[in-house]
């Protein structure tokens, strides 16, 4: 990785990142693994920067403006994703508000930094030496005071701000997609569900099945909650369960023998069907 950084190349970093993205399907696990991976890369960068001397000012600018900022941006992005998922409300209607609140914060960030963002978006370069090099003297009025808490050998006055700009742009797109998906899902769920099927077994049996499917993470890569799954089954099988879901699961846990009674029955009847079909 560091060899690639020396050559001002992000290919290895992006390749390793894509491997993690393709390995994990659960959003939380994916974000955790990526955060650990990037933090390790940044530790390597720290050691390298302490002793490295850039041959030219342009080489230093390129590193802090194009390479380090993009790596840090991914770290910020996945930490934000982890935070969003960890604080996601259970109720579907509150989830949209949860995402919209973050979008509002991103818009506030954009308003506060609009001149710098304009500088980046227009591919301007006239302040690059000020923003993306580690010169000992800089205009103290232009410097962001947050630079004080960082080691001047490892960062410039604006490379972290650029990383935030990149990260929040990615985050805004991600959130907008999440909101669109939630709105589409809500629109589908409010349409009349045409089904002639009725659940004729015990309600507790269906609740046992719902919990099993939830724990198996078969819906939305494990992101769907019990209430969402229950609502779909209620619509599909014309049955009311919501008031009984949590209480009935408590009863299931209290069973002294064969706690997964209904699932065991399903397994038995299916195995019998398979055996009979082979005869």
Image (cartoon, rainbow, N blue to C red):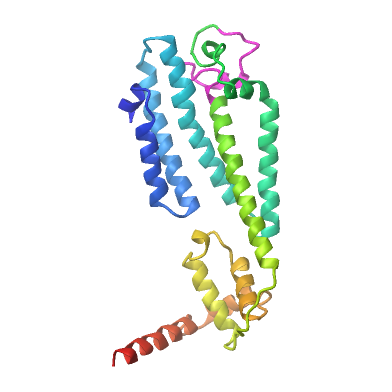
Q: Main secondary structure of the magenta part?
A: loop
Where residue 174 appears, x then y in whole percent? 57, 45
Residue range in magenta is 138-160
On the rendered image, what quadrant is the N terminus found in? top left
Count the marks: how many?
0
- Examine the rendered structure and indicate whether residue 35 appears above or below residue 29: above
Q: Is residue 99 left or right of residue 154?
A: right
- Examine the rendered structure and indicate whether residue 119 appears above or below residue 107: above
Tell me the residue at 38%/34% (across/down): 13
Where residue 129 appears, x then y in whole percent? 52, 11
On the rendered image, what quadrant is the C terminus found in? bottom left
Tell me the residue at 48%/84% (across/down): 261
Tell me the residue at 67%/59% (across/down): 92
The quadrant where residue 275 appears: bottom left
| Residue 128 visible in the picture | yes
- Examine the rendered structure and indicate whether residue 23 appears above or below residue 190: above
267 part of magenta stretch? no
Q: Is residue 104 left or right of residue 131?
A: right
| Residue 154 visible in the picture | no
Where residue 165 appears, x then y in whole percent? 58, 30
Tell me the residue at 65%/11% (across/down): 141
142 part of magenta stretch? yes
Where residue 84 appears, x then y in whole percent? 59, 47
The quadrant where residue 148 appears: top right
Q: Is residue 122 left or right of residue 263?
A: right
Looking at this rendering, what residue extends furthest in the top direction? 137
């Amino acid at each position: 990785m560091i060899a690639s950084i020396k050559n001002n190349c992000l290919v290895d970093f992006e390749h390793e990142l894509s491997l993690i993205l393709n390995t994990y399907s659960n959003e939380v696990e994916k974000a955790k693994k990526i955060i650990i991976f990037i933090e390790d890369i940044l530790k390597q960068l720290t050691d390298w920067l302490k002793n490295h001397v850039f041959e030219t000012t342009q080489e230093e600018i390129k590193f802090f403006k194009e390479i380090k900022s993009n790596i840090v941006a991914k770290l910020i992005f996945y930490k934000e994703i982890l935070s969003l998922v960890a604080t996601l409300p259970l109720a579907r209607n509150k989830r949209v508000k949860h995402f919209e609140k973050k979008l509002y914060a991103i818009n506030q960030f954009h308003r506060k930094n609009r001149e710098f963002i304009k500088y980046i978006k227009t591919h301007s370069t006239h302040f690059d030496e000020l923003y993306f090099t580690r010169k000992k003297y800089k205009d103290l009025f232009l410097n962001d005071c947050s630079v004080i808490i960082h080691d001047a050998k490892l960062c410039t006055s604006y490379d972290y701000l650029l990383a935030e700009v990149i990260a929040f742009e990615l985050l805004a797109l991600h959130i907008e997609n999440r909101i669109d998906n939630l709105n589409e899902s809500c629109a589908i769920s409010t349409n009349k569900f045409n089904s002639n099927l009725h659940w004729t077994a015990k309600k507790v049996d269906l609740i046992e099945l719902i919990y099993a499917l939830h724990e198996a993470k078969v819906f939305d890569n494990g992101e769907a909650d019990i209430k969402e799954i229950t609502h779909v089954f209620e619509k599909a099988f014309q049955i009311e369960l919501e008031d009984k879901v949590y209480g009935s699961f408590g009863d299931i846990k209290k069973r002294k023998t064969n706690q997964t009674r209904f699932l065991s029955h399903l397994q038995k009847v299916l195995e019998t069907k398979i055996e009979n079909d082979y005869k």
